[in-house]
Amino acid sequence: MVLLAAVLLAACLAKLMVREQGVEAPDHVHGVPVPAAIARLSALRDSRGMTVGLGVGEGLLGLALLVTSHPSVRLATTVAFAAATWVVSELRVGRPDAGCGCFGGLSGRRVGRRSVLRAVLFTCAAIASLQAPHAGLDVLRNVEVLVGLVLAVEVALFAALSPELSALLGRRGLPPGQGRPVMPCERRRSPIEETYATLYDSAAWVEHENVVTSALPLDVWREGCWRFLVFPARVDDREMEVVFAVSTAERGRTVRAALVAPEKSLSPAL
């Protein structure tokens, strides 16, 4: 009961205080279309208004667990954790590139087995607490040795199943003036204008600029940490295509290029 309240309050504070950097919600992940239901779920997860609303709700529920033992509060907690388990499981299958947002911007890493197992265990703990006779504060006022040991084990298990701890330590360990940690390139929002600016300022563009025959690309798509642009070209009176791969990383962006014949695959080794 005490652990569930602490987790809900921690999730509330993280959602309200630690904002996740802007992330594009792709239509495809590794070439596989994202199901419509998962796309809608991702849009809700990425909405700041939804994040704040969930954080406030979790905070109120955590406080209620501390001050009352009313069955409705225990039932609401169980439903909340069961819903969270379903959401985390769906995101792990349908959006392997996205974090769960369970603890705001700290939950930016892709959903793994630990996050799913953690949600399942919390749901089981919430079910077990349905018959608990005391509120959280009452338990804290009269902590017995056995209860203290159980709580210590629960906290240790929670820490072992929480990748957010390393993210939090990483934020706290940043040198002064360095700023926030870098968003993983595959999840970072990269406007097309940024891609063009990086491309036109690159040595790869200078090398192939004279053979490019159109200012507009034939095709543009993004996959992982790269955005690909295909331009028509003419080399020694032959119709060719130049495929540029532009990094979407926040820092140290690179550009690679390859000439291919139009009839060949547009997926050369870059």
Image (cartoon, rainbow, N blue to C red):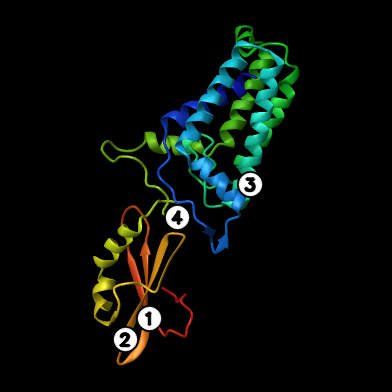
Quadrant location of the C terminus? bottom left
- Determine whether the residue tagged by mark 1 lies in a helix, strand or loop: strand
Percent coordinates x, y for residue 208 in the rendering:
28, 78
- Determine whether the residue tagged by mark 3 lies in a helix, strand or loop: helix
Query: What residue is pinned by disc 4?
Result: 186
Amino acid type at circle 3 is Glu
Marks 3 and 4: which is nearer the front?
3
Residue 253 seen from this side: no
Quarter assignment of residue 75:
top right
The first of marks 4 and 2 along the sequence is: 4
Quarter assignment of residue 154:
top right
In this rendering, is residue 12 above or below 38?
above
The first of marks 2 and 1 along the sequence is: 2
**Residue at mark 4 to residue at mark 2: CA–CA distance:** 32 Å
Among all residues in the image, which is located at the extreme right? 131
Q: Is residue 125 left or right of residue 223?
A: right
Residue at 56% x, 22% y is 6
- Determine whether the residue tagged by mark 2 lies in a helix, strand or loop: strand
Q: Is residue 172 left or right of residue 207?
A: right
Residue at 54% x, 41% y is 100
Percent coordinates x, y for residue 138 in the rendering:
63, 8
**Residue at mark 2 to residue at mark 3: CA–CA distance:** 47 Å
Amino acid type at circle 1 is Glu
Q: Viewer-proximal residue, 117 or 18? A: 18
Query: What residue is pinned by disc 1?
Result: 241
The first of marks 3 and 1 along the sequence is: 3
The first of marks 3 and 4 along the sequence is: 3
The first of marks 2 and 3 along the sequence is: 3
In this rendering, is residue 93 above or below 84?
below
Query: What residue is pinned by disc 2?
Result: 234
Query: What residue is pinned by disc 3?
Result: 90
Q: Viewer-proximal residue, 82 or 117? A: 82
